Image (cartoon, rainbow, N blue to C red):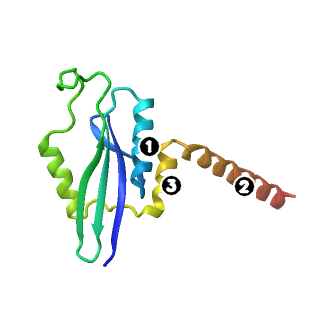
Amino acid sequence: MTVHTVYEVRAYREDDWQIEAVLDDQSLAVAAARKIESRFANTPVVVVQEIRDVARNHLKSRSVYRSEPAGQAADGDGGAKAPPSDARRSAKREAVKTGARAVRPAAEAQDTVCSAAGTQLPWVLFGLLLLTIATYVAVKSFSA
């Protein structure tokens, strides 16, 4: 029986829950969520544990950490924008159950963290620079 457990760190931005990181350790996921909270005020953050049983094609999700935006009072009255409605949550949950969105294995978690931090753009630019240099050298060698 193959069971994969991952922890998704999600932040509520631009009227949707966006996956910020996928980790295989709960304490690291909660630490990442707290770091996001400290960087972005009034951004709700949640850590969701997803357990996927490949043999039975079963996915079980549960929230293991939820933040409260700084401007929101304990009674829920603070003017913060409400998360998605129950209908949207149900639709997303059903999409996950039917396999519309695959859960990434823990081995890919580091790549997700890097792209979430915005460090992918310099590597793309570096690759374009290398391609430009290689093209220039090739053109010079054929024209000589």
User: Left of 18 or right of it: where is 119?
Assistant: right
Q: Secondary structure at mark 2?
A: helix
Q: Which residue extends farthest right?
A: 144
Q: Can I make out residue 21 in this image? A: no
Decide which of tag 1 and tag 2 comes sooner along the chain. Answer: 1
- Residue 4 at x, y percent in the picture: 35, 67
User: Left of 6 or right of it: where is 94?
Assistant: left
- Residue 2 at x, y percent in the picture: 33, 75
Q: Which residue extends farthest left?
A: 87
Q: Are marks 3 and 1 in contact (CB under 8 Å)?
A: no
Q: Which residue is mark 1?
A: 32
Q: Are marks 1 and 2 in contact (CB under 8 Å)?
A: no
Q: Can I make out residue 106 in this image? A: yes
Decide which of tag 3 and tag 1 comes sooner along the chain. Answer: 1
Q: Which residue is mark 3?
A: 110
Q: Secondary structure at mark 3?
A: helix
User: Left of 40 or right of it: where is 122?
Assistant: right
Q: CA distance from mark 3 to mark 1?
A: 12 Å
The disc labelled 1 sits on which kind of residue? Ala
Q: Secondary structure at mark 1?
A: helix
Q: Residues within 10 Å of mark 2 (few under 14, many from 20)?
A: few
Q: CA distance from mark 1 to mark 2?
A: 41 Å
Q: Which residue is mark 2?
A: 135
